[in-house]
Amino acid sequence: MKLVPAHVAGARGMLMMSRAELAAASGVAEKTIWNFEEGGRIPHEDTLQKIREALERRGIIFHNGGKPTVTLDPDRAIIPSNLAD
């Protein structure tokens, strides 16, 4: 599945998570997240994986199917969504 900027922005919104919080949780620079979400530079695949894993640990499920979609399933969260890494 290809992670796109709308996935990350939507997931952060569902989790009420700032870019700074996602940066801390994923180990990725906040500027990298900002650039990606704003349609700038596409990060390396390993960087995208770190972002994806940080959001999935909080219960986010990513979908493509022609339209980027995210859903939140708190029961699938490995850690509670209100805890930072």
Image: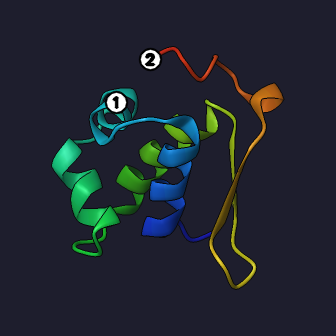
Q: Amino acid at mark 1?
A: Glu
Per the image, label 1 sits on a secondary structure element best described as helix
Q: Residues within 10 Å of mark 2 (few under 14, many from 20)?
A: some
Mark 1–mark 2 Cα distance, whole angstroms, equals 7 Å
Q: In the shown orientation, is residue 61 left or right of residue 17?
A: right
Give me the residue at 69% from left, 22% from top.
Answer: 78
Snapshot colouring: rainbow
Give me the residue at 22% from left, 54% from top.
Answer: 32
The residue at the far left in this view is 31
Q: Is residue 73 above or below residue 66?
A: above
Dot label at residue 43: none
Per the image, label 2 sits on a secondary structure element best described as loop
In the picture of the structure, the residue carrying the numbered disc 2 is: 84
The residue at the far right in this view is 75
| Residue 63 in which image quadrant | bottom right
Give me the residue at 62% from left, 39% from top.
Answer: 56
In the picture of the structure, the residue carrying the numbered disc 1 is: 21
Q: Amino acid at mark 2?
A: Ala
The residue at the far bottom in this view is 66
Q: Are marks 1 and 2 in contact (CB under 8 Å)?
A: yes
User: Can residue 66 be spotted in the picture?
Assistant: yes
Toward the viewer: 22 or 3? 22
